[in-house]
Amino acid sequence: MRLDYLNGTQYTIYQPEGMYHCNSDTELLGRFMRIRQKESLLDIGTNNGALLLYGAVYHPLSMTGIDLYADVLDVARKNLSMHGLQAELIETRVQDFKGKMFNVIVCNPPYFSTAKKDLISTNPYIAAARHESFLSLPDLFASVKRLLKSNGRFYLVHRASRMNQIMQLAFSHGFVTRILQIAYETEGGKGKSALFCFQCGNTSELIVKPPVYLDDRDSFDRLEGMV
C-alpha cells in the first residue's frame, strides 16, 4: 500500500495495490466542486475516499460515501481517520440507496461502454470503477434526481467526447448545466475531460469556465465550480 499526496489539499491518501487509484479526473473533479459549510455531501463510488477528502476542505455539515465493496470502504475509512475526519460509509449500489437527500452530490463514474468486452478488467475493483455495466449514465442521473435536494448541485466529470449524451440525459431528468469546464492534455489538443455542475430547473445562463491543461499545473488554479 502506497501513501500519496492528494494534489490541491493538505491531505495524503493510502492507495492499495490492486484497487483503483486516483487519476487526473479525480483531482479535476475534487478541485472543481464547491461546498458550503452547512451542506451535506454524497460521493457516489467513494473508492479510497479521495473525493471525500477534497470535500472535507470545505468543512461540510456531513459527508456520506457509497461503494460496492466493503473492503474498499475500509480504505476510505482509514484515509479519513488518518486526518481526523469522519463520513458515513455505506456498502450499496446507488440504484438501491434509500438515504436522505443531499445538498451536493459528486461522482467520477465508470466511463467505458459494456459493448467493449475486451476492456473489462478481471479485477472486480477496477471493473466497477471503469465499466458502465455497474452504473450506467441513465441510472446515475435517475439516482441523483431522487437523492438531490431541489436547490442542490451535482458535480460530474466524464469524457469530453460524450458531452452531447450527458447534457441530453441531464435535461431529460430535469437538470440544466450550470457550469462547464474542459480539461485538455495540452494547449491546442483535443478536449479530454469535461467537468459539469448541474442544477434542477435552474434557468440561469450557462457559465463556461476557462480551459485547464493537464501539462500545465498552473492552469489547475482555474478550477472553480459554484456555491
Image (tube, rainbow, N blue to C red):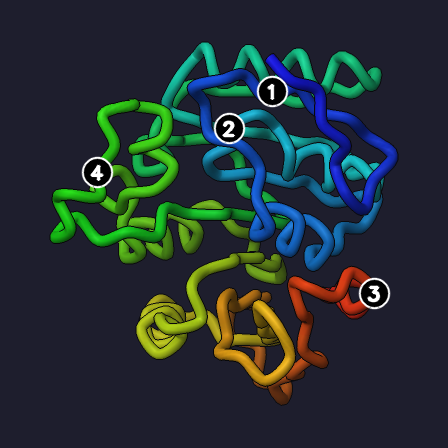
Name the residue beneath numbered marker 4: 120
Give the mark, 2 or 4, whose residue is nearer the N terminus.
2
Question: Looking at this rendering, what residue extends furthest in the right direction?
Answer: 10
**Residue 224 visible in the shown view:** no
Mark 3 surroundings: few (<14), some (14-19) or many (≥20) residues within 10 A: few
Mark 2 surroundings: few (<14), some (14-19) or many (≥20) residues within 10 A: many
Q: Which amino acid does the dot numbered 2 rest on?
A: Asn
Q: CA distance from mark 1 to mark 3?
A: 29 Å
Name the residue beneath numbered marker 2: 47
Give the mark, 4 or 3, whose residue is nearer the N terminus.
4
Give the mark, 1 or 4, whose residue is nearer the N terminus.
1
Q: Is residue 119 left or right of residue 150?
A: left
Residue 169 at x, y = what percent? 32, 69
Which quadrant is the N terminus positioned in?
top right
Give the mark, 1 or 3, whose residue is nearer the N terminus.
1
Give the mark, 3 or 2, whose residue is nearer the N terminus.
2
Q: CA distance from mark 2 to mark 4?
A: 18 Å
Name the residue beneath numbered marker 3: 218
Q: CA distance from mark 4 to mark 3?
A: 35 Å
Tell whether label 4 touches label 2 (CB within 8 Å): no
Q: Which amino acid does the dot numbered 4 rest on?
A: Ile
Task: Name the secondary structure under disc 1.
Answer: helix
Q: Nearer the viewer, residue 149 or 82?
A: 82
